Amino acid sequence: MACMSPIFRRKQAVAPEDRLVTLIRKPGCHLCDDAQFVIEKVCGDLGVPWERKDIEQDPQLHDQYWEQIPVVLVDGEQHTFWRVDEQRLRKALTD
């Protein structure tokens, strides 16, 4: 009988400090301020680096996300927009 390899493999876990959260925002946006507060808290708790990008300074981001700001990316993939749920972000960064 031949040895069979597993069909399902778990994704390799990524340590929190190797993740990156990106907040795409614009000046004077109260939802962006709220999102940043949550990101600062969660990333601070978990040791996850994060960055802020101004949608008004990047035409590509503007075209892609203008109607959704604030937008949160985790490792370059869209995680959420408009409102950031602290528990959902925490889970995305620790799973």
Image (cartoon, helix red, strand yellow):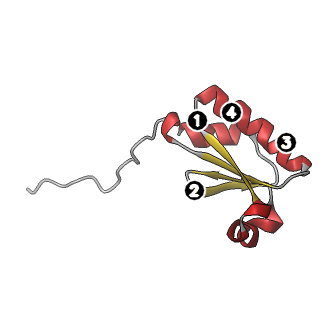
Residue identified by numbered label 1: 48
Residue 88 image position (x, y, % from top left): 68, 42
Q: CA distance from mark 1 to mark 2?
A: 14 Å
The amino acid marked with disc number 2 is Gly
Residues at circles 1 and 2 in contact by the CB criterion of under 8 Å: no
Q: Quadrant of the N terminus?
A: bottom left
Of callouts 1 and 2, the N-terminal one: 1
Of callouts 3 and 2, the N-terminal one: 3
- Category of crowding for the residue at label 1, using alpha-carbon neighbours closer than 10 angstroms: few (below 14), some (14–19), many (at least 20): some
Describe the element under mark 2 as helix, strand or loop. loop
The amino acid marked with disc number 3 is Asp
Between 12 and 59, the one lying in front of the other is 59
Q: CA distance from mark 3 to mark 4?
A: 13 Å
Describe the element under mark 4 as helix, strand or loop. helix
Residue ID at (59%, 38%): 49
Residues at circles 2 and 4 in contact by the CB criterion of under 8 Å: no
Residue identified by numbered label 4: 42
Q: CA distance from mark 3 to mark 2?
A: 21 Å
Residue identified by numbered label 2: 76
Residue 15 image position (x, y, % from top left): 47, 36
Residue identified by numbered label 3: 34
Residues at circles 3 and 4 in contact by the CB criterion of under 8 Å: no
Residue ID at (72%, 39%): 39
The amino acid marked with disc number 1 is Val
Residues at circles 1 and 4 in contact by the CB criterion of under 8 Å: yes
- Say which mark, if any, is on residue 64: none
